Structures are given as structure tokens and as C-alpha cells.
Image: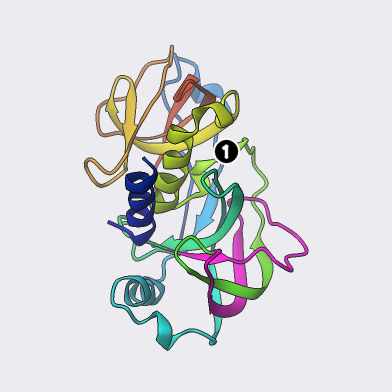
């Protein structure tokens, strides 16, 4: 289980991998093949060294070896709304390898950011690895500059989980499922594999997370990777349109 997920689980207990893939058309009630893709193609980055570094920092207690050092990270840009702390968090992330089962993500300190890229954009982030109590995992990149290598220009929603690593999507879902009133009525995009006729699940790991949806369209077979787009209502992605995907 990834470090961010462990921290969110701990909070709840107290308070309560480079490839470019096109989304495939799904059977959306029989006319999905004629519709524009819900979540267009966006670029993801494969970097095994970043994953190894991520593991060393957050699992092997080597963070102190990197504090104060300049870092350059190339990956997908994502925003996560952390309702627990009432802040928007910014990340650059990617996959370990082409299987896309393991991801890495580095939080970006927002101070000094002159422009926020569109979610799903491929970016280059330069900054200093810094210890901070304000960071979700207590470390982030500060004094950062963010340059856009390729800007995502497709449709965006209020909560864009389709541009998050599976770890970050888990973090966002924990916030949404524990503060449903705050997210009520917001448009959302999510992804996962079909778990049942009413739920999607983490794309690779059992029992990591599930999210309920309600839809009038044909649900693909169990295990099919999908994007799910709709409106968040009472903890459910309602009026949901499902689309098969190979992006994750």
C-alpha cells in the first residue's frame, strides 16, 4: 500500500509509471461509438528510477538523504482537493513501468507558482526537496518552477480523478467519501475496473478502494477498465457514463 494511502488511513483512524494512450469507445447505451471520448488522450510518464527513489524516501527512511537537494521531475500534473486540511494539493506523477500497476508522485509546494497548468498536462517541475508539516507526506518540492511540455486541452470536470495516479485517486476518494456534502453536485471523472453493476474498484489491487455509481447505460463486463463521468450525489457518481479505456 502506498504511503499516501497509509497516511489517509491513519487520519481516518484517529478522526474517525512514458506512454501515451487513447481512451477507447465504450457501449454507452448503444451510441457510445459516435460520441467524443469523455476523457481524451493524455500523456503519462514511465520512470523506474523515480519509483525507486519514491520507495527509498517514503518506505526505506532515506528522506533525510535528499532534503535540501535540487530535483527535476517530469510527469503528469494533478490536483487533489484535501478537505481534511481545506487545501488544494498539486502533484507530478508517473508509473514505474508499462504495466502501470505501480505509481510514484511528488507533491509540489504551491507558494510562488505563477501559473497552474491544466490537469493532465505533461510537466517538468524543478525545485528543492523540503521537509514541511504542510505537505501531506511531510515532504514536498519547494521553490518550484513548472513548465508545460504538452498541455492537456480536453474536457475537464470539477474533480478530475482521471488525471491522478491510482494512489492520488484513492486520496481524493477518501476525502469525497468522508465529506460528501462538500462535494455534492460537483461533476467528477474517475477510473478503475468494473467491480459490479454499481461499483468500480482500484484498477489493480483488491480491497484498496471502491466507488459506487448509478447509470442507465450498459455496464461493461466485470474487470473491464473504464472511466466513469457523472455528478457526485450522496456519495455516488450519479447519471454516470462509462467508457472503456486502456489509459491506466
Residue 184 rendering spot, x and y as whole percentages? 56, 25
Where residue 150 sits, quadrant-wise, is: bottom right
Q: Can residue 37 be seen in the rendering of this structure?
A: no
Q: Nearer the viewer, residue 167 or 40?
A: 167
In magenta stretch: residue 109: yes
Outermost residue on the top side: it is: 216
199 inside magenta stretch: no
Residue 31 seen in this snapshot: yes
User: Residue placed farthest to the right in the image?
Assistant: 114
Percent across and percent down for residue 134 are 56, 64
**Residue 68 drawn at (x, y percent):** 54, 86
Q: Residue at x 54, y 71 (%)?
A: 132
147 sits left or right of 178 in the view: right
Q: Quadrant of residue 26?
A: top left
According to the picture, the residue beneath numbered tag 1 turns out to be 159
Please report the bounds of the magenta region as a residue range. 105-134
In the rendered image of this protein, does residue 25 appear above or below residue 70?
A: above
Give the camera-side residue of 118 and 177: 177
Colouring style: rainbow
Which one is nearer the viewer's eye here, 159 or 48?
159
Point 57% across, 73% down: residue: 141
Which residue: 54% across, 32% down? 188
Amino acid at each position: 500500500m502506498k504511503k499516501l494511502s497509509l497516511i489517509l488511513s491513519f487520519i481516518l483512524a484517529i478522526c474517525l509509471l512514458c506512454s501515451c494512450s487513447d481512451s477507447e469507445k465504450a457501449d454507452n447505451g448503444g451510441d457510445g461509438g459516435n460520441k467524443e471520448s469523455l476523457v481524451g488522450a493524455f500523456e503519462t510518464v514511465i520512470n523506474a528510477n523515480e519509483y525507486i527513489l519514491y520507495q527509498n524516501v517514503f518506505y526505506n527512511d532515506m528522506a533525510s538523504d535528499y532534503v535540501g537537494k535540487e530535483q527535476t521531475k517530469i510527469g503528469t500534473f494533478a490536483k487533489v482537493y484535501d478537505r481534511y486540511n481545506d487545501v488544494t494539493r498539486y502533484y507530478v506523477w508517473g508509473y514505474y513501468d508499462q504495466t502501470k500497476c505501480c505509481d510514484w508522485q511528488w507533491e509540489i509546494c504551491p507558494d510562488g507558482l505563477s501559473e497552474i497548468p491544466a490537469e493532465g498536462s505533461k510537466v517538468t517541475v524543478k525545485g528543492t526537496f523540503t521537509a514541511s508539516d504542510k505537505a501531506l507526506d511531510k515532504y514536498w518540492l519547494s521553490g518550484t518552477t513548472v513548465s508545460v511540455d504538452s498541455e492537456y486541452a480536453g474536457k475537464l470536470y470539477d474533480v478530475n480523478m482521471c488525471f491522478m495516479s491510482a494512489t492520488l485517486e484513492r486520496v481524493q476518494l477518501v476525502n469525497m467519501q468522508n465529506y460528501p456534502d462538500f462535494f455534492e453536485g460537483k461533476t467528477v471523472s474517475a477510473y478503475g475496473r468494473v467491480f459490479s453493476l454499481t461499483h468500480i474498484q482500484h484498477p489493480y489491487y483488491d480491497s484498496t478502494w471502491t466507488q459506487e455509481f448509478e447509470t442507465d447505460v450498459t455496464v461493461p463486463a466485470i474487470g473491464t477498465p473504464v472511466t466513469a463521468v457523472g455528478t457526485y450525489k450522496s456519495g455516488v457518481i450519479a447519471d454516470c457514463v462509462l467508457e472503456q479505456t486502456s489509459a491506466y
